[in-house]
Image (cartoon, rainbow, N blue to C red):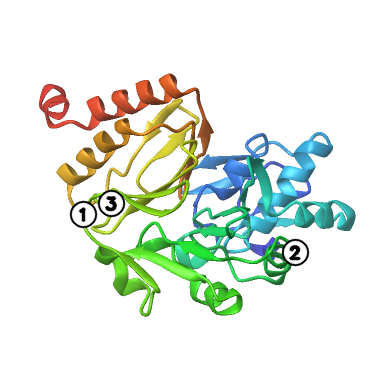
Amino acid sequence: MADRAKRLDTNIDGDFFVDSTCINCDTCRQLAPKSFEEVGEYSAVLHQPENDQQLHQAYQALLACPVGSIGTDHNDQRMLQQARAGFPMPLEGGVSYCGFNSEKSFGANSYFIEHPGGNWLIDSPRYVGQLVEAFEQRGGIRYIFLSHEDDVADSDRYAEHFGATRIIHQGDAAAVPGAERVIEGVEQVELAPGFLAIPVPGHTPGSMALLYDEKFLFSGDHLWWNPGTETLGTPQRLVWRERALVASIEKLLAYRFEWILAGHGGRIKLPLEQMRARLRQLIERRSPRHATRSA
């Protein structure tokens, strides 16, 4: 829980606040954009919740914060428990956002897929009883897809508890010693019917995206939505190889998907042709010839 003594001066007066332990991971701003905004190197509460929906979102942000930087002067236990019960948070088609982001992955998002052939966990949240119980009630976890080395978090604990198969690319496999399945090369791999692993090296040598049902693209830290500019984004720094990154973005034009579900950054659903248009815009911005013209 946040420390009132470390409350940031940038917070507006009121019940919710952010303290100086904030790592500016964007989790709170994704979950409760009406209340939390980025101010300098931290998030802050610039608008106190004004209705039950905003209050629910603010409590979800409090719970999901990976470092416990969000606090309240007076906890509403009923609303807090409702927010807790809302995780995993359903999105569409059996896909949910897990919540309880982990400090080990710098607050990366993780996702859960309920599927008759076995459930999937994409990257890892914190290992917490709330999620363990929720996953058990939904039939457990059969597969854990790890998009890259940065976001493995507590995947080993979930794998041990559920007897799940961990899947990671060879390029990042050192982050998961003993992974049950290691993908090699740069070609797509069908992991199960409807589940396609797409190697997208660039951010790291072993970055992968998971395409589910030709609708949901779990993109790790390779690709995300920027709600401020309403554009797709991709890493500007912490890039293993720039040319590989651009080629990996171009590769995604060959696939059909409507959702981008990122590890870091916003998630978005767009019609297929709009999604492709945004990808083309991103490729144009990141291409070497665009960099030359802009210099």
Residue at the disc numbered 3:
203
Compared to 148, does 30 lie above or below? above
- Horizontally, residue 130 falls left or right of residue 174, namely right
Q: Is residue 53 visible?
A: yes
The numbered disc on residue 240 is 1
Q: Secondary structure at mark 1?
A: loop
Circle 2 or circle 3, nearest the eye:
2
The numbered disc on residue 56 is none
Q: Secondary structure at mark 2?
A: helix
Marks 2 & 3, CB-CB < 8 Å contact: no
Which circle's residue, 2 or 3, is located before the other in the chain? 2
- Horizontally, residue 90 falls left or right of residue 73, namely left
Q: Give residue 53's position: percent from left, percent from top.
A: 79, 37
Q: Secondary structure at mark 3?
A: loop
Q: Give residue 177's position: percent from left, percent from top.
A: 35, 79
Marks 1 & 3, CB-CB < 8 Å contact: yes
